[in-house]
Image: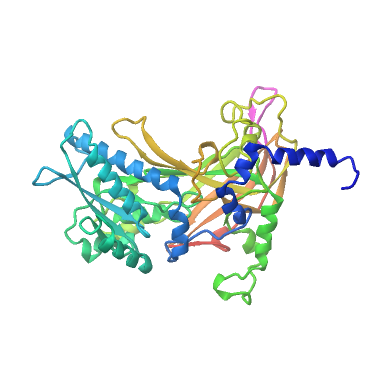
Amino acid sequence: MGSTSLLPYLQYLKHLRGRPEVVAALDSVDAVQESSYLDFLQSPLQPLADNLDFSTYEVFERDPIKYASYGSAIEMALRDGLEQMKKGKDNVSYEILENGAVGVVIFVLGAGRGPLVSQALSAVGKVNASPPTSCPLVKIIPTVLAVEKNPSAVLFLNSLVRHAPGWEETVRVVPCDMRTASRHPSLAGMRPADMIVSELLGSFGDNELSPECLDGAQRSGLLSPSAVSIPKSYTSYLAPVSSPRLHAEAKAQAYSPSCGTDGPGGAPAGVQRAMETSYVVRCHASAQTHIERECFRFVHPAPHASPKQNEKDNEEKISGCNDRFARVLFRPSDAIAAMSCGCGYGPCDNRLAISGRGDGSASPSITPPRVVTIHGFLGTFDAMLYRSSVDPSRSVSISIAPHSFSVGMFSWFPLYFPLISPLCVPIREHSIAASVWRKSDKTSVWYEWEAEIVSLPSVNRGGGCVQDTMMACSPIHNTNGRSSKIRL
């Protein structure tokens, strides 16, 4: 840099980098571990179609926040069930055993290597050690069914049943697909589930087919009419992102083999397929330009997934019941509020946050740019694991959406939906409208998406409101799942 006038700026940047709060954030153990993932595009997992390897399980099992939250949700649900049973409520189906204890059947769907089973057993132990004041002498006797289709994980679970303390007399492994678990011989005569627990969520909430898996288990008759699902619901969010780096990385996927098993000599994917595929990414060199807005929401147990007598008629009626469409509008006020969202991953920075979300108020010294280039959208989610039926003010949630981010949780990164051609948006005067479809057929599920630049509605001389006008738009990406699908 020599003797140029830029040297003071470099010195000041070095000074900022050396501040204790910056060093604590950028040089922490977690930051160093995730450095290799920054802006690196990954194909989303397909755990329903593929069997995960042990290294993948190990990464997820190190997440302390996720499993602690699941444990708290299970404990809260058990306490609520005991209190409602004591009050004689009909919406609890716990079994009263001969010795006065309470039998609770817990199904862990997609048990993997057993972290949720351990959390369920730990929650039962905590409730038995400190029962609700309304029933201080009641003891829970759990029956935990670990449903898992991955043969390697089944072997691991069986070894835990033989050797882990408290497993042999409590846990039973069911090696099958959860959608057909009720027909498995080991469940013959088994009472339906009082509680189902699963960790089938993806970066966009439903992109690892949690709705299809849990609805399938419900249709098969696995659940009692009063069964509790953990998670209870999950909501996906969408936000525009400006990132030449992510766009370039997505376009570079055109030179990768279209089939991962083909190796380096495989036929290249091509630009269309590369830019019509969603990617999991720990975004870094990016800017979320507007606050995230709600896209899809799923609730379990689902009203449409109750068991039917005629299985063929049931399949015809439920076909496409989890398909969705959302048109999400991002207004200029959302751009002002989004300055606290940073790269789109992690909690909002309260030092830059505006009072309230999307109210348009801001510090006079902080204003968004006049024009931004939108390179795609970031998909995130939050999940309500459980809300107390006794005291609705008590709940347990997890989230990777910036407005409610679970600090310390690293199991999920956002899902990046690229745009083939970036859109230049004058965000102070125009809005962005994103349309997202979730579609399915008998073999797969896929997303389609497109973006529009729309003018703000105006009022004409007669006092009537003029509808917004589309100024520019992108093509619909991944039409009919031509480039990317999630296999059922």
Answer whether residue 181 is magenta in the image: no
Instruction: Name the quadrant containing residue 387.
Output: top left
Q: Position of residue 409 (x, y in %)?
A: 49, 46
Q: Nearer the viewer, residue 102 or 9?
A: 9
Q: In the image as oriented, which residue stretches furthest toward the right? A: 3
Q: Position of residue 144 (x, y in %)?
A: 25, 54
Circle count: 0
Q: Nearer the viewer, residue 325 or 11?
A: 11
Answer whether residue 463 is magenta in the image: yes
Q: Position of residue 161 (x, y in %)?
A: 27, 61
Q: In the image as oriented, which residue stretches furthest toward the left? A: 98
Q: Residue at x 64, y 54 (%)?
A: 39
Residue 420 appears in the picture as rendered: no
Residue 279 appears in the picture as rendered: yes
Q: Is residue 136 shown left or right of residue 377? A: left
Q: Nearer the viewer, residue 443 or 218?
A: 218
Please give the range of residues in magenta: 455-468
In this picture the colour scheme is rainbow
Q: Position of residue 399 (x, y in %)?
A: 48, 42
